[in-house]
Amino acid sequence: MINESMSIMRDGEQDYLPIPLPGAEGVFVKVLKADEAMDRVVVKIKFDPGSRMPRHYHYCRAIAYTISGNWAYDEGAFTAGETAWEDEGTDHTPWSDEGAELFIVFDGKDGRYLDNILDDGTIVKLDMPFLKAFEGLSLAEAAQVDAQSLVEIIPPAA
C-alpha cells in the first residue's frame, strides 16, 4: 500500500540529465527526490568513460553506492557493490576512467550541499534549490530550466 509517507521512484522512466556545470562534461544526474523537510537529496549519477567532476567541498554527508563500473577520487577507488561514506568537510575530485553508475544520498543541515571549485578558482554552489529544480525532469523539461539562476557563483579571488 502506498500512502503519503511512501513513494515509488521509477527511475527507469527518467532521463539522465547532463550536469550543467563547467568541468562536469560526461557526467549525468537523475534527481530522484529532493526532500526539503528532511534536507535530503537522492540522486543517481552516471560517469561516461574518461569523465570527471570538478573538485568539490561537502557541506553535507554523502553516501555513494556503486551500482556498476569503477570510479575513484583522492581517497580511493570503488567498484560495483562498494560504498563511499563522505562526511561533511570532505574535499575531493571524483572521476571514472571506464564509466560508472552510482546511487547517492546527500544528508544536509541547512540546504547546502556542494561547493564545486572550477579550475580558475570560481566556486559554484549546488544547493537544495538547484537540486529540487531538476527533480524528476525529462531532458526536454530540464532544457527549460535556467540553471544559472539557481546557483550562487563566487568569482576567483583577485
Image (cartoon, rainbow, N blue to C red):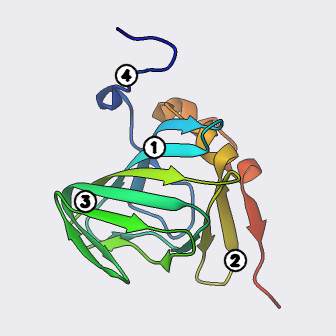
Residue 22 lies in quadrant: bottom right
Secondary structure of the residue carrying numbered label 3: strand
Q: Which residue is mark 2?
A: 122
Query: Tag 3 or tag 4, which sits nearer the N-term?
Result: 4
Q: Residue 100, labelled with which disc?
A: 3
The residue lying furthest to the bottom in this view is: 158
Q: Quadrant of the C terminus?
A: bottom right
Q: Which mark is residue 42?
A: 1
Of badges 4 and 3, nearer the viewer stands 4
Q: Residue at x 76, y 60 (%)?
A: 152
Name the residue located 35 percent from the left edge and 72 percent from the top edge.
Answer: 95
114 over 134 or under it: above or below = below
Q: Which amino acid type is marked by label 3?
A: Ala
Classify mark 2: helix, strand or loop.
loop
Q: Seen in the image, is 145 located left or right of residue 154?
A: left
Q: Circle 3: is it few (<14), some (14-19), or many (20+) Cα within 10 Å?
A: many
Q: Front-most of 88 and 79?
A: 88
Mark before the other along the chain sequence, 1 or 3: 1
